[in-house]
């Protein structure tokens, strides 16, 4: 059973998402709240496995709410409901430990897929999320040069990082480099260890911030 908590200040969204999740036998909505304070108060009684947070229309783009949540519930993965208008916040959201983004016009099947990914310890970021984020970072950090030693990564590992930054999947990266998806996963684990990052999102951010690609 996957216990889910919903934080959303527009009841219309909650009324739409609940029927979708209710159709999945192993999903259980244990909490709904419209404010972060009420949300955290209710969580003292029952801890969820996944937090679904609709960031749209949230005060200060939801950053302060995320900080409060992560301070209390740092190990619980958060799936954000976002729109392209929030691209400038994507980097901040990732810094706050968000593990997945899903756009508000996504189909129900994608919502279920994203929750399953997070429950299995994976991130969920669609390819267009990576493109939006990397374009933003390139534009706003083009004049900043951070020198880092790249020698800690092998040429193959650098190739893997570059392809992850393009938003490719394990299978697509494997096909491009003529290796198996399992080998790609092995490379990724080695890269994360060397760079001291915990997720694909952190790895991509590190790559851009340190001119690895």
Image (spheres, rainbow, N blue to C red):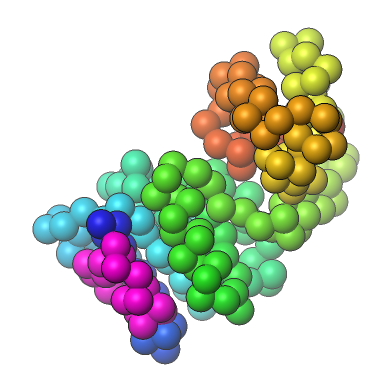
Image-quadrant location for residue 19: bottom left
Left or right: residue 205 versus residue 63 is right
Q: Nearer the viewer, residue 181 or 33?
A: 181
Q: Which residues are magenta?
A: 17-34
Q: Position of residue 202 (x, y in %)?
A: 60, 37
Q: From the viewer's side, name the closer residue of 184 and 61.
A: 184
Q: Quadrant of residue 159?
A: top right
The residue that appears at 40% across and 78% down in the rendered structure is 20
Residue sitting at 71 percent across and 30 percent down? 180
Q: Is residue 98 magenta?
A: no
Q: Is residue 206 visible?
A: no
Q: Residue at x 52, y 31 (%)?
A: 198
Give whichever of 170, 40 is nearer the camera. Answer: 170
Residue that lies at the very extreme toward the top in this rendered image: 151
Across and down, in percent, residue 96 comes to: 49, 47
Place of residue 150 in the rendered image (x, y in percent of width and height, measured from the top left): 78, 16
């Amino acid at each position: 059973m996957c216990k889910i908590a919903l934080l959303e200040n527009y009841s219309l969204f909650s009324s739409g998402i609940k029927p979708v999740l209710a159709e999945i036998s192993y999903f259980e909505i244990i909490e709904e709240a419209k404010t972060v304070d009420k949300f955290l108060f209710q969580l003292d009684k029952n801890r969820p496995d996944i937090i679904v947070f609709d960031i749209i229309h949230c005060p200060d783009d939801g950053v302060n709410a995320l900080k409060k949540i992560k301070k209390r519930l740092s190990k619980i993965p958060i799936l954000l409901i976002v729109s392209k208008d929030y691209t400038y916040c994507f980097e901040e959201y990732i810094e706050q430990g968000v593990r997945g983004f899903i756009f508000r016009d996504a189909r129900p099947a994608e919502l279920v897929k994203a929750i399953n990914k997070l429950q299995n310890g994976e991130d969920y970021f669609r390819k267009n999320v990576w493109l939006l984020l990397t374009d933003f970072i390139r534009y706003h950090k083009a004049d900043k040069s951070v020198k880092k030693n790249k020698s800690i990564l092998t040429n193959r590992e650098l190739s893997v990082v570059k392809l992850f930054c393009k938003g490719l999947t394990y299978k697509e990266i494997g096909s491009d480099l003529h290796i198996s998806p399992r080998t790609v996963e092995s490379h990724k684990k080695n890269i994360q260890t060397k760079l001291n990052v915990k997720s694909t999102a952190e790895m991509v951010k590190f790559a851009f911030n340190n001119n690895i690609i």
